[in-house]
Amino acid sequence: MTDCPRSLLAVESANVQETATTSPDVELVASIREGDSTAETALYERYSARVYFLALSELHSKEDAEDVRAETFLRVLQSLRQDQLRSPGSLGSFIVGTALNVIREQARRRYKTQSLDERELNLSGERSLESAFIDAEAAQALEEAARRLKPRERAFLRMYYYEELPNEEIARSLGVKEERLRLIKSRALKSFREMYKQLTKG
Amino acid sequence: MTHQEIEEKEIIERYVRHKLPPEERLAFQEHYFSCDECFERAQMEARFISSVRGASAAGVLAKAQPDAFEASGAALWMRWLKPAFALATAASLVLTIALGWLVFKQIPGLRQEIAREREVREQIERENQQSIDKAREELQNERQQLELERSERAKAQKQIEELARNEPSQTNVPIVVLEAVRGGGKGNQLSLPTNAVRALIWLDVEPGNRFGSYQLQVLDSNKHLVETIAGAKPNSYGALVVNVSAKSLQSGRYVVRLYGVRSGQRELVGEYDLQVGRQ
């Protein structure tokens, strides 16, 4: 996958051109339609992480996200084999739409099968479901990044992301200007990113 | 959806935090399906926010207390340091201002004042020196004058003594009493015998001590000075009696001028006609 186009308009425009000059997605779609199994593998490699992330963002469950990924690719490949994709240049949007459908079905199915207690547990523990994104490296990276921050900045992270207090209240509580909050956020994220990359590289 | 829009609206963070409306959420999902950079950033932001929430829930990111920041070690240090630093800064500021005031305002003023005083003092010293020099010069002149007078006096004394030795003694010395003459009278007459060596002139002067001494000048009819007699003082009769050389007086008309001398200044006191006749 190449660099991001600067706008959707640009994306569409690029897609039109790519259609004419055979973009990677168009080639991929064409190959899958012709029964090329390596093209199917390439499709999976290109989009599987995105589908998983999308599903995890929506369902907050690794297991459900895995199920959504598998089901989504099954449906996408079936559609491509049967030549049901009208515009091969918009393969990404097609996969997103398919994944969201699968997610909705998954959520509906889970809702039906869950007991009332489990539903209440899920509602009250919605925030804890986001721990799906946390791995050992992320936790360590945050610890390291937090160590570099001042107490005031650490307090900001908690108040902003966990307690979800309004900026105005946080600024007043910490005795800083509101404009500074964005700077703190940016510094903390940058530090976290560096630490995480360092940890995952090793 | 452009990258600028994503940045300005903080789309990635809002997506992860489920703060986007459905349309924008879908638009961003479609966007990161075709954009590696935004997908990577969205994943990282999701990890970060989840980690922050997890750490907060676990108590790793402790809840902020009202004085949490100040209660930390650094804050305690700062609590002491801030007033000290402020005090030191204030003191430095005051010293700097005072120093600046001294260097740029007071010292130049004082220097100017000192220079002015020095100049005045030098001027006074110069004037004093000039006065001293002038006084010395005057003193020197007076000394020279005195010396000259002494010398002349000694010389005159010598001449007088010489004359006295040479001159023969004389009896019946001719004398004339000078009186002021008004109108056309006979006037003051002095008859000199052919063998007369000297003649006496008698003048009455005003009583009192208005003048320290008198000076007598004898002038001929052409106003040429014939003889001067100085340092004359009145006798017990309140009259001046002066001795003139008979040789310098020829037959003819003379004028005798009498000056009073006071503090080195002379003042004309009287003028007398004198008719000299040789026998």
Image (spheres, helix red, strand yellow):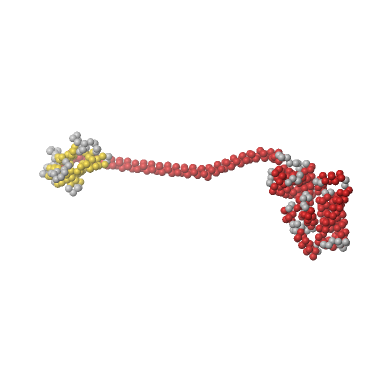
Instruction: Look at 81% across and 51% down and name the residue there.
Output: A57
Instruction: Look at 82% across and 62% down and name the residue there.
Output: A87
| Percent position of residue A130, x then y | 81, 47
Residue farthest to the left, as pictured: B279
Residue nearer the viewer, B90 or B133:
B90
**Total residue callouts:** 0
Do we see residue B242 in this rendering?
yes
Compared with B81, A132 (above or below) is below
Find residue B99 and report its image quarter.
top right
Compared with B14, B80 (above or below) is above
Do we see residue A36 in this rendering?
no
Residue farthest to the right, as pictured: A113
| Percent position of residue B145, x then y | 28, 42
Q: Quadrant of the C terminus of chain B?
A: top left
Residue nearer the viewer, B107 or B49:
B49
Find residue B265 and report its image quarter.
top left
Residue farthest to the top, as pictured: B236
| Percent position of residue B162, x then y | 19, 40
Residue nearer the viewer, B128 or B19:
B19
Instruction: Look at 73% across and 40% down and name the residue there.
Output: B65
Instruction: Look at 88% across and 59% down and name the residue there.
Output: A78
| Percent position of residue B248, x then y | 17, 45
Say left or right for B234 vs B19: left
Q: Quadrant of the N terminus of chain B?
A: bottom right
Say left or right for A105 vs B169: right
Say left or right for A125 vs B278: right
